[in-house]
Image: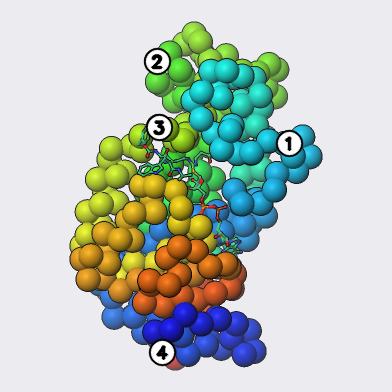
Amino acid sequence: MDPSSSDAPDGLAPSPAEAGVASWLRSATRVVVITGAGVSAESSIPTYRDKMEGLWASFDFRTLATPEAFSRDPETVSRWYDFRRTKCLEAEPNPGHIALARLEREIESRGGRFTLLTQNVDRLHQRAGSRHVVELHGNIIEWRCTTTGRRVAELPAPILEFPVASPWGGVLRPNVVWFGESLPEDAVATATRASQECDLFLSIGTSAVVYPAAGFIQLARAAGARTVEVNRDATPISGVVDAALVGRSGQILPRLVERAFSSKG
Ligand code: BV8
């Protein structure tokens, strides 16, 4: 199926490409979805591509999201993560998150398997009701002790000093995976197995350039799964997926799931 703009004529009825993907969703029994910042962008959380603003305008996230940056300047890195954590807590799940939670229920109610892999650290999928979420890059809500590895579910409010002192000595760090850090072994194992066994793999709102997360779609393709991309801009996988739906995740996802599973069929 050719890549096509998914701008449905009246904004409501799905385009032919969307109708095709909706039929794939209806017949799939083992579905994997991977999401990126383009899903949370619909909840006004800036993506990693977006230029950072205000206090952080002079920073590039890749220079802050590393263990080296944290050991070099724990105060600045902790302040940045606390700023982002607060934004995530203030954000609300959007129609795209809600559609993915419905998709999980629809697939599982038919006896199918559904796995949601996310690169996002904001936990909005869980707040939207998604249950089988694999956090490939951890989450920004929990922080953990750099001395004991023990986690804290939330930070003291207000934080009086950065870096944040740990109750167990030393300091706390966000429970995310930084560049140069390995992904959680259980997350990689679950993602690998689900990708190798699925019959439909959807990549949504991600630039598909950060590995090993960007590699799971290749496992799915190699295993014969149909692949779909839903993204605002072209990415390195746009030309190889079976269907590339171009547009906003918060608009396309609800249309897809409604078309696939509404009683009207
Ligand atoms: C690792 C948490 C082993 C922190 C993040 C090959 C194999 C293995 C590793 C590598 C490799 N090649 C290079 C590496 C190293 C590196 C890497 O991939 N680098 C890249 C830059 C080339 N990978 C790693 O370091 C990983 N670790 O491999 O361990 C190891 C160990 C030691 C040494 C080497 C290897 C760890 C990577 C995880 C880093 N942590 N996040 C935090 O959040 O602060 S990454 C972070 O950036 C995200 O989690 C995400 O993964 C990535 C950004 O990607 P997106 O989510 O896609 O967001 P982005 O802004 O880029 O794009 C948004 C997209 O949405 C756009 O396409 C846009 O068009 C679209 N969009 C926007 N709005 C909308 C929309 N679409 C729809 N609707 C909209 N409204």
Distance from disc 3 to disc 1, alpha carbons, whole Å, reads: 24 Å
Provide the residue designation for mark 1: 58
Q: Residues within 10 Å of mark 2 (few under 14, many from 20)?
A: some
Nearer to the camera, 243 or 258: 243
Provide the residue designation for mark 2: 148
Could you say whether the residue bearing mark 4 is in a helix, strand or loop?
loop
User: Which of the marked residues, 2 or 4, is nearer the chain's N terminus?
Assistant: 2
Could you say whether the residue bearing mark 2 is in a helix, strand or loop?
loop
**Between tags 2 and 3, which lies in front?**
3
Distance from disc 2 to disc 3, alpha carbons, whole Å, reads: 18 Å
> Is any part of residue 159 visible from this angle?
yes
Q: Within 8 Å: ligand 1 and the Cβ of disc 3?
A: yes
Distance from disc 2 to disc 1, alpha carbons, whole Å, reads: 33 Å
Provide the residue designation for mark 4: 265
Which quarter of the figure has residue 236?
Answer: bottom left
Q: Look at label 4 and name its amino acid.
A: Gly
